[in-house]
Image (cartoon, rainbow, N blue to C red):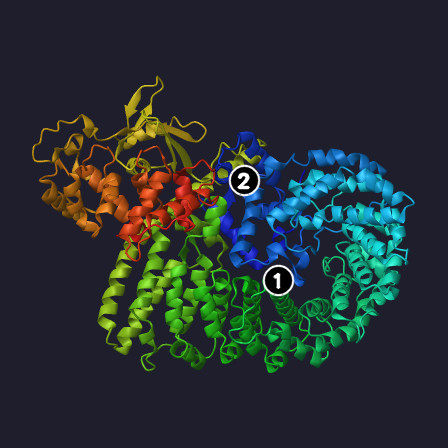
Amino acid sequence: EKRTMSDGSQQFSAEELHEIKKVFALVDRDGSGEIDAKELEQVIEKLTEEKPSKYALQQFIEEVDGRNKDGKKDGKIQWDEFMNALSEWVTRANAGSNKAQSRKRSRGPENDSAKDKRQRLHKKIAAFFVCFKQSSDFESIRSKFRALERKSTGVHSGIATDQHRTRTEIVTASEKEQKLKVIAEAAEKLHLLATQITGDDPNKAYAATWNLADMLSIVDILVTPEERFQNSDLIIKIFSRVKEMVLIPRIALFLRDISRPELQYHAARVLTYYANGPRIAHTPKDSAIHPDKMMHKWEVLKTGAWRTMTLLVKFSRAPKVKVQCVLALGEIASYHHEARNGLIEKGVYPQLLQVITKTTPVDILRPVTWALSVFSGHTHDIEKHPPNYRAISAGLERFVWIVNKVDDPETLLNTWCILSYLMPGNVVHKKVIQHLVRQLTYVPVELKRAPGETSSNVKMRVIRKEKMHTLRSLKLVLVRCLSDMIKLNTVSVKELISYRLLININKLITSSTQSEDFDVRLRSCELLGMLASERGCAHDIISANLIPSMVYLVVNDEFCRWKAVEVIKFCTMVQPEQMRLLITKVGLVKSLANSLSFFKTRDSVLTQVYNYYEPTFNFKFAEDVITALNNLLSICNPDNGLVNYFDFDLLEKLKAVMFLLVSSDKANDQIIAWAELRQNPIPLEKIIRNMMTKIQQMHAQSETSARKPISDFVTKTISDFNRVYSKYEQKMIKRKRQIERQRATADRKQGAGGRMNAMDTDASGKIKVKCIAETGDNKVLFAPYDVKLQQLMSLVQLKYSKPMLLRYADWDDTKITIDSQDLLDEALKGISNGELKIYPLPKFKDRSFQNNSNHSGSHQQGGGGNMDIRELISQTRFNKGDFNQLKKHYAKHAGGLNRALSKQQFVKCLGLVGKVSRDKADVIFKAFDTSGDGHVSFDEFVVRLSMLKKGDPEERIKMCFEAYDLNNDGSIDKTEFLNFLRVHNRSNGGVARSEQKLRDEVDEIFDSDDIDVDGDGKISLEEFKRAVFNQKIILDSFWLNEC
């Protein structure tokens, strides 16, 4: 069936799309712009630590493939197919979440740092990749509710999402567990509660109603839909029993008992919790409890309880009852446009408006303004289902009074939320707009604190934190409201600027210093970017002194820097005089040069979620920085002296980025996909090269004192770059042609009517190499399908940390040594299911069998002494000049290349990499002595030194791990880790810790789930690497810094 899908990216914000594109590039390892089965298998295997079956992969691809506008299926996942499928998955995963509280306060996950928010998004994406394993988890829920579906009546189709506002107090994990235990025990006696509720004893009915309300509050105790999914059996049991026992009509009658306000209060609580249903993630579309069905909400509406609650809101003398009825009406109207519109037609909205008077206490204004915000469009898709704006605008005067007179962040948040729906597109009084701009810097009186004043009361600190979060949400609403008004031309931009908009935004950014304020900073940058790029306000932004704030965000704010640098880029397209000020007064050239260090990063979130330890590249960020620098360079001439700001420091950083773009395989893979999305046909590396040439020319024309060294530096750099770039270009052309051929093959198969098997064609060009060693030390690595012999030997050597002979099995299982490219090509012909099996052997003999008759203390080297030096060079990262120096240095201390180093000789020889302590020298000696015979041969010394000086961080971390794994069992136990801490303690200087403190630290580390993840009392290599990258274990610079 041909499916036509809408653009799934519309569900995500700009920063979320930025993260999703990063993940797509991470999975699309070859940069082909599509994910094939092999790439999908690799990411799922990393996430689940088990290899998915071929059938599971096929099912996943068939489910996602074709989710684009043309509906074409080709056995691979394109970007738009990925986005549409992910959008649908996130919608299901968000069932019942409080994500839609973007304009209202939220608790728990929403009150997190930028890193926490990113991690939460990436966990959802990771869940999407393994979702085929969860496809049947809801079958029990489906079967339980089939009977209920037959009983239910009045079921209507409704909204696309069913997120819910949370009001429970924050509880600890132990408190939550205790509450769930109490609710589970009470659920077993639900039939007794039903008897008491329907009985004649009013006291028992009151107690039972209270208990039922507490039981239904489970949907607020379990804050997220995923938590509710994990406890779905209990939640469904409660809701289904309440429906089966027909308790809701009886509960609605309790609202009429005006003599018992406590009973009215708890009856309103029951209806508040029950109205929106269980709100469980991944609810099947055909289930009666799916949010679109709104079965529970219509059950409440049919009782007519809304009439009674509307009267209680107006006439009840019990504030608690009044508040709970307002909340219940808001819940009924939320997330369902038919319910909302029906209540507006019945006159509920005007009745709520009448509650707002000059004498209404703030405790009543808060819930009333929240409910009115729901009627005004909050929690609804107002583009598809807008509210009755004529009815809503009747309260405009009261809302304006609130924002002018009330000093309460939560009430103001709700009210500005309402106005944010009413103001864009409508003519608004100037005073309201002025107040909107002023409130960007609003701080309530209760949050103003004298310098040095602190609160010792824990409860007061929690309350203050909650109010600060509400204030943060208020600022977000104000910024979004301003953005909407500017987009729709509701207000003149010049008028806004005259009201000190830019000055207040600057104050807002500089005051939002907490990690939880990242949303405020990000939305403010988006607003400034729109003003600079679309409204021509770059001049005003510079005049308001906002560029230093943007520079600060670029340097210090990981989450906002990509938006801040966009603002800077647009502001470098102004008049020369202002650009001169940016260069001379702000120091923008130096700041942008320093920011280029963020081009290549190691993303801790990707490491934690996807076990991804490789670097990531911020191409768009680097391109914006280069564009801004080019704009600033354009105003330089021999007369103004500005070229002096484009100095050696900038040229070195430009050189680093330029060579990284053409020398890193990982960057090259990602560049292919990124280049297809760029509008500029000129590669970024060529733009940098041209920029360096222009800087060289400007220095020569200006006759600066640095013109000669800069000219020599640029000339040599460009010469080296051109040599490297010619090879890089050929490799990129070859890779693109390879991808095009594979796409053409897939299209031919598709055109021939045959269903292309996603497992047969691998667009990544990667093969899995399984190394089967005689010692049982088997390894797995990935190599290009056109891999060369030297390249494969290097990959295997890195895996085993020593040179290896490669062999393959012939048709009769005869092992043949691979010593030429022709034999490797023959071995590649035997690939089965994308896997090549090789049988490696150590290239050098084990020195434990050598004759140790040398009386001088130096061992005669065995098989390694007969090795061709050129072959040894090829197995390391040293060039010929480095290698000759190493030979002289080694021979000086060992007495010749054919002799092995003792531990004492090794310590002296190790002076090549710097001075080390005796304790550390023992550890390093073990890392170099791979054979374990107590001596280090020349080949061991060269190979391990290559890893230590030239290897990437992951290789050096592995080397450190092997050094401290004293018994070579592949893990570090408490005794071995204690030795690690002792060495680290004695060799790093500073105040040494006592032995007892070290032992306590070992116990604490091994008790932590963050390090010993599987809880087996040992730290594996993967756990050790993850802990180092997450800075749970700190290694000294000897192991992590390139020497």
Identify residue for label 2.
Answer: 76
Residue 729 horizontal/vertical position (percent): 35, 50
Tell me where residue 598 sits by quadrant: bottom left
Q: What SS does tag 2 mark?
A: loop
Left/right of residue 344 with respect to residue 454 in the rendered view? right
Q: With respect to residue 677, does 125 lie above or below?
A: above
Q: Is residue 382 above or below residue 730?
A: below
Residue 94 position in % (x across, y down): 65, 49
Residue at point 78%, 47% (across, down): 211
Q: Nearer the viewer, residue 325 or 254?
A: 254
C-alpha span from label 2 to label 1: 55 Å
Residue annotated with mark 1:
459
Residue 556, quarter of picture? bottom left
- The quadrant where residue 811 appears: top left
Amino acid at pointer 1: Lys
The amino acid on which the numbered mark 2 sits, given as a three-letter code, is: Lys
Front in this rendered view, residue 894 or 194: 194
Relative to 924, 885 lies left or right: left
What SS does tag 1 mark? helix
| Closer to us: 652 or 574 | 652
Where, quadrant-wise, is the N terminus in this rendering? Answer: top right
Q: Residue furthest right?
A: 200
Tell which tag, 2 or 1, sits nearer the viewer. Answer: 1
Whichever of labels 2 and 1 marks the residue nearer the N terminus, that label is 2
Seen from the viewer's position, the closer of residues 572 and 924 is 924
Residue 352: x and y in percent read 82, 66
For label 1, count other residues whose C-alpha is less than 10 Å away and answer few (under 14), some (14-19) or many (20+): few
Location of residue 570 with respect to 277 vertically, above or below: below
Above or below — where is 583 with respect to 149?
below
Q: Is residue 998 left or right of residue 216?
A: left
Please say whether residue 738 is visible from this viewpoint: yes
